[in-house]
């Protein structure tokens, strides 16, 4: 059972320490000290459950002024990577589940994605825009190896000559270099690889089922060698924990073939603040309060503030120094140029296969 000041103990391969009720639940569990030593609470990892998500829509619209895309697709709800800082964790509360362990172990797969996407792109009113894939939960999390929803989406986008910008921290993206390299040759694909730390031990506890830092750098190399433009996203930068690595991360990514870069400050909205705090005190008790104090310095005294314009970068002297360091490093490494542009002019609705109804007619029962 969980409650303030109590968690269920470390679990191998999982990020969250607890499974606290979501913010919409009427009842919460209260924990108690039963006298057992903490090390006995370290238990085996709960298994991942892959569940169907029979959503009727597949493309989400974005109206946030500080996010660089208008439309996006997230093939999965929940993410098995288990990154403790993941800003998408609170979305599981809408499903009546916990943003803690439920988010990592109960993954909803949008199995109808190809059909829904074809219908969406075939609408007479549709106007092509760059589509972001995996901007909320990772499109290449481990379950994708068998579910293959992301690959099916890429196949549809390729058929329609529709541009896509991918974001991932998984080496599994290299499985789809056949599609991505073909699309990139037509200026229809770009991949951003999230690189948070070069320390494998920190990555193991912070991002337990994501690809190791070395594998992510190898991913950048492989994608780049196949003509796929790659950006590096150094995110999140966590004051006092991994922010000292910023220049090293950018140098390693540039050396592997990344051509552009961006960064985001740690965000702790809603339930994530409590989940991150208990994780930090468990794994880094000697520096936990300093890290939390530095975070508050970048958020006007709070753990998080959601105002547009500052939520991605923070405010105050510490955040300003991070931005300055990023600017200096990217200029030195040539990562500050954004010359690559995806092409929206090639978009077309493909003709129906023999024996099939036109996608557009299908919208009207034809």
Image (cartoon, rainbow, N blue to C red):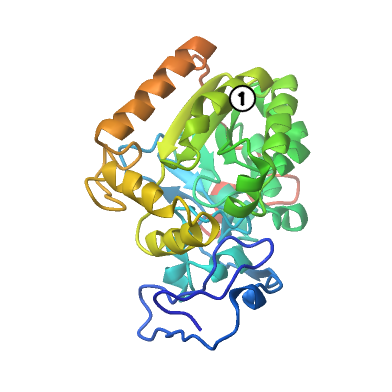
Residue in the foreground of this view, choosing between 87 and 291: 291
Residue under the point 46% across and 75% down: 20
Which quadrant holds the C terminus?
Answer: bottom right
Along the line of sight, the residue nearer the viewer: 161 or 258: 258
- Residue 159 appearing in the image: yes
Q: Position of residue 149 (x, y in %)?
A: 67, 53
Q: Position of residue 320 (x, y in %)?
A: 30, 28
Residue sitting at x 71%, y 54%: 142
How many other residues sit within 10 Å of disc 1, few (<14), some (14-19) or many (≥20)?
many
336 w.r.t. 153: above or below = above
Q: Is residue 29 left or right of residue 140?
A: left
Farthest left residue in view: 300
**On screen, residue 115 above or below 190:** below
Locate residue 228: give its quadrant: top right
Measuring from the top left, give residue 81's x and y in whole percent: 62, 54
Q: Secondary structure at mark 1?
A: helix
**Visible in this render: residue 69?**
no
Residue behind mark 1: 253
**Looking at the picture, does residue 158 appear above or below residue 41?**
above
| Residue 290 x, y percent position in the rendering | 38, 48
Q: As drawn, is 186 to the left or to the right of 32?
A: right
Residue 112 relative to residue 21: left or right: right
Total numbered badges shown on the rendered structure: 1
């Amino acid at each position: 059972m969980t409650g303030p000041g109590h968690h269920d103990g470390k679990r191998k391969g999982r990020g969250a320490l607890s499974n606290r009720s979501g913010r919409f639940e009427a009842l919460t569990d209260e924990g108690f000290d039963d006298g057992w030593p903490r090390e006995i609470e370290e238990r085996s990892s709960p298994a991942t459950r892959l569940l169907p998500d029979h959503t009727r829509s597949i493309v989400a619209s974005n109206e946030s002024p500080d996010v660089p895309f208008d439309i996006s697709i997230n093939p999965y709800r929940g993410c098995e990577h288990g990154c403790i800082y993941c800003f998408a964790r609170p979305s599981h509360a809408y499903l009546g589940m916990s943003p803690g362990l439920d988010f990592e172990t109960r993954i909803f797969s949008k199995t109808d994605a190809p059909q829904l996407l074809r219908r969406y792109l075939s609408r007479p009113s549709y106007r092509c825009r760059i589509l972001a894939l995996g901007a909320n939960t990772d499109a290449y999390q481990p379950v994708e190896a068998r579910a293959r929803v992301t690959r099916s989406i890429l196949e549809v986008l390729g058929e329609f000559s529709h541009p896509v910008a991918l974001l991932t921290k998984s080496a599994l993206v290299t499985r789809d270099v056949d599609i991505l390299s073909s699309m990139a040759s037509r200026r229809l694909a770009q991949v951003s690889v999230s690189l948070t730390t070069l320390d494998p031990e920190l990555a193991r506890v912070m991002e337990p089922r994501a690809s190791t830092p070395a594998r992510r750098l190898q991913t950048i190399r492989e994608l780049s060698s196949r003509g796929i433009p790659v950006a590096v996203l150094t995110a999140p930068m966590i004051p006092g924990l991994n922010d000292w690595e910023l220049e090293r991360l950018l140098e390693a990514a540039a050396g592997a073939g990344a051509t552009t870069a961006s960064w985001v400050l740690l965000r702790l909205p809603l339930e994530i603040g409590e989940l991150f705090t208990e994780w930090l005190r468990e794994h880094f008790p000697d520096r936990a309060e300093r890290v939390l104090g530095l975070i508050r310095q970048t958020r006007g005294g709070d753990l998080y503030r959601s105002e547009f314009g500052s939520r991605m970068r923070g405010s105050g002297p510490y955040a300003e120094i991070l931005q300055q360091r990023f600017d200096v490093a990217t200029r030195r490494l040539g990562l500050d140029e954004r010359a690559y542009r995806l092409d929206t002019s090639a978009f077309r609705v493909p003709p129906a296969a023999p024996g099939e109804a036109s996608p557009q007619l299908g919208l009207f029962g034809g």
